[in-house]
Image (spheres, helix red, strand yellow):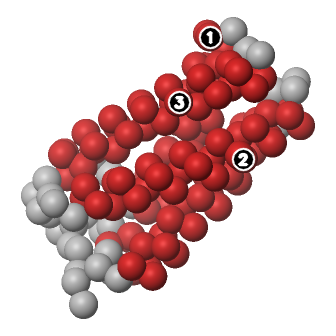
């Protein structure tokens, strides 16, 4: 069994879910998707066009969230436990990419202006990303 140790960071993900087991990767990805859908649905409910936004957001996340998490897991396997800053850089770059892709989708599907599409995408993704940091125990 391959263990992925983040050192003394108290990282819940690496201590509870061994990163070397593909079936556990799937579990991790599904849990991340569930939390993302929950948090971003709560954010979407704050908007006037909530019903359509929730549907569009859910469809977007069914694609973008697993892809992002798979890429992150694969890349993270190449860094040692002393490379937490590198993992933060990778996570940040991936999140920026997701915000851009989802803003484009929101622009098209919700008929938002570019500004509103980017703001809504950034707000939803920042909310779910922050929640994920708390749940999984990643702290600077």
- Which of the marked residues, 3 or 2, is nearer the chain's N terminus? 2
Q: Which residue is mark 3?
A: 101
Residue 114 numbered tag? 1
For the point 55% across and 37% down, the residue is: 125
Q: Percent position (x, y) of residue 71? A: 36, 53
Between the residue at mark 1 and the residue at mark 2, the CA separation in whole angstroms equals 20 Å
Residue at (86% x, 34% y) in the render: 52
- Can residue 140 be seen by looking at this rendering? yes
Using the numbered discs, state the Cα–Cα distance from disc 3 to disc 2 in whole angstroms.
Answer: 14 Å
Q: Residue 69: image x %, image y %?
A: 43, 56
Q: Residue at x 20, y 52 (%)?
A: 84
Q: Answer few, some or many: residues within 10 Å of disc 2's Cα (few below 14, many 20 plus, some between 14 and 19).
A: some
- Residue 30 is situated, as x and y percent measured from the top left of the image, at 57, 67
Q: Nearer the viewer, residue 16 or 25?
A: 25
Q: Residue at x 75, y 26 (%)?
A: 109
Q: Which numbered circle lies on residue 58?
A: 2
Quarter of the rendering occupied by the N terminus: bottom left
Upstream in sequence: badge 1 or badge 2:
2
Q: Disc 3 on helix, strand or loop? A: helix
Badge 1 element: helix
Q: Picture quarter containing residue 72?
A: bottom left
């Amino acid at each position: 069994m391959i263990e992925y140790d983040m050192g003394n960071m108290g990282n819940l993900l690496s201590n509870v879910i061994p990163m070397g087991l593909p079936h556990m990767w799937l579990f991790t990805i599904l849990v991340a998707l569930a939390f993302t859908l929950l948090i971003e649905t709560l954010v979407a409910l704050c908007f006037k066009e909530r019903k359509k936004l929730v549907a569009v957001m859910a469809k977007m996340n069914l694609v973008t969230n697993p892809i992002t998490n798979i890429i992150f897991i694969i890349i993270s396997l190449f860094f040692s436990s002393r490379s937490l800053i590198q993992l933060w850089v990778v996570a940040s770059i991936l999140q920026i990419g997701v915000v851009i892709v989802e803003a484009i989708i929101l622009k098209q599907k919700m008929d938002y202006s570019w500004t509103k599409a980017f703001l809504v995408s950034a707000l939803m993704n920042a909310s779910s990303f922050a929640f994920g940091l708390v749940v999984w125990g990643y702290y600077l």
